[in-house]
Amino acid sequence: MQALSPSTPNNHMRPSLARRMGRQPVTTVRVVRCIYRSDPVNFPNGIGSNRADWQSSCAILNASSKNISREDQPTEGGRADHVAAVNGHNSAVDLNLVPIDASKSSPPVAPQPPKPLTITDLSPAPMHGSQLRVAYQGVPGAYSEAAAGKAYPNCEAIPCDQFEVAFQAVELWLADRAVLPVENSLGGSIHRNYDLLLRHRLHIVGEVQLPVHHCLLALPGARKEFLSRVISHPQALAQCEHTLTKLCPQAAREAVDDTAGAAEYIAANNLRDTAAIASSRAAELYGLQVVSDGIQDDSGNVTRFVMLAREPIIPRTDRPFKTSIVFAHDKGTSVLFKVLSAFAFRNISLTKIESRPHRNCPIRLVDDANVGTAKHFEYLFYIDFEASLAEVRAQNAMAEVQEFTSFLRVLGSYPMDMTPWSPSSSKVD
Ligand SMILES: O=C(O)C(=O)C[C@]1(C(=O)O)C=C[C@@H](O)C=C1
């Protein structure tokens, strides 16, 4: 089976099911022009230069207007005001977008003098986040939806059919935050999402670590001995690899876009020979039965998600902060030790280091007249360190790192998730 995506035939069933759930997944579309009505979260005083820019650069999007034309793929590297991700045909209502009709526009009102910016205008809303619109990849019941709820209780979670679309939803003010899984304690890093962090200009403003408790789900009455395949997100398949071999050795494993989408697909197509790895909430939402509960290979299975916003938060020192950076050097990996020592000398702990291919310059050739040409792979390095950028030691470390690197970007300086440890229990039958 192909992965569920906007272009695959499977996709036709997803909007209908999502509609049953009360909302449609965000898909990639081209919006002609749009206006943003209000942003109570980022600009509670009703003022902000970003919003003004946005208003002047955009005009009309009407939920029912014919101005929206669907496209299968987002424009690669396209400008934010050309490509939008909106929610189905009722999007304008859901997303606070209002039509402008010049003939019916209200009478002119005296211009209001701008209110001075305050510190709250500059800093995104705190983590309790009511009314925050949070874009996530997947359909209701996905772990990313649960992560959005953990980070921002009472938020409005907006399903998106791709991670790329979740980024665009924030860039285009259709959502206030995006939630992005970056690593799992069993499956490791989600590499593609590291690449997306660099390709887009959003800022990391928070993190949550979510215990991930997987279930094997099938249609009511289905027996695990007769299952011929198990479908899920590749990370979920990896996290249950050994347990699955014991439970259903006969079943083939197939990757799809998200865990809950796998459950939805089985229900929509009445597949009696197929099971999904997904959450118990997905079982409830799509009417499936839990064949086995707690099938992750380790009871302490945890996925780390980062929260992304258009603006960075102001780093503080009154609680534990983490900072994420990415860097490269035109002399390659030889600078890595120097960069790491900038943190070590200041007693700053690193919590994560990841390397990704340097796509702009993947290979560096070093000619040696005597022995020939060495071909070195080039990397971008992602580092998370345990300090706030408001701390002098972190600022000094960064100044030193800047000297050693040819490219350096701060992805965000944000509060660490310090919630109590509650591992998901393993309950395999
Ligand atoms: O498919 C989902 O439910 C997701 O939210 C995605 C995702 C991931 O990308 O890692 C999130 C958490 C789990 O680790 C498995 C899958």
Image (cartoon, rainbow, N blue to C red):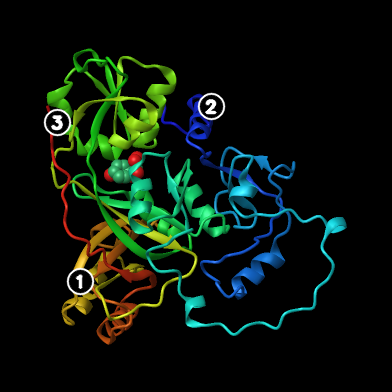
Q: Residues within 10 Å of mark 2 (few under 14, many from 20)?
A: few
**Residue at 23% across / 12% down in the picture?**
226
Q: Residue furthest right?
A: 103
**Residue at 50% across / 26% down in the picture?**
13
Q: Nearer the viewer, residue 85 or 417?
A: 417
Say which element carries label 2. Answer: helix
Say which element carries label 3. Answer: helix
Question: Which percent across, then down, holds residue 28?
Answer: 57, 43
Is label 1's Cβ within 8 Å of ligand 1? no
Question: Which percent across, then down, holds residue 426?
Answer: 13, 38
Tell me whether the residue at label 1 lies in contact with that at label 3, contact meaning CB atoms closer than 8 angstroms. Answer: no
Q: How many angstroms separate mark 2 from mark 1 (CA)?
A: 51 Å
Q: Which residue is mark 2?
A: 12
Q: Is 394 on the left-hand or right-hand side of 268? A: left
Tell me whether the residue at label 2 lies in contact with that at label 3, contact meaning CB atoms closer than 8 angstroms. Answer: no
Q: Residue furthest top?
A: 226
**Residue at 68% across / 65% down in the picture?**
55
Residue 239 visible to the viewer: yes
Q: Is residue 231 above or below residue 227?
A: below
Is label 2 or label 1 in front? 2
Q: Which residue is mark 3?
A: 243
Q: Nearer the viewer, residue 391 or 190?
A: 391
For marks 2 and 3, the one nearer the N-term is 2
Q: Which mark is residue 417?
A: none
Mark 2 residue type: His
Q: Which residue is mark 1?
A: 337
Q: Nearer the viewer, residue 344 or 47?
A: 47
For marks 2 and 1, the one nearer the N-term is 2
Q: Quadrant of the C terminus?
A: top left
Which of the 4 quarters of the picture holds residue 219?
Answer: top left
Question: Which percent across, then down, holds residue 351?
Answer: 20, 65
Mark 1 residue type: Phe
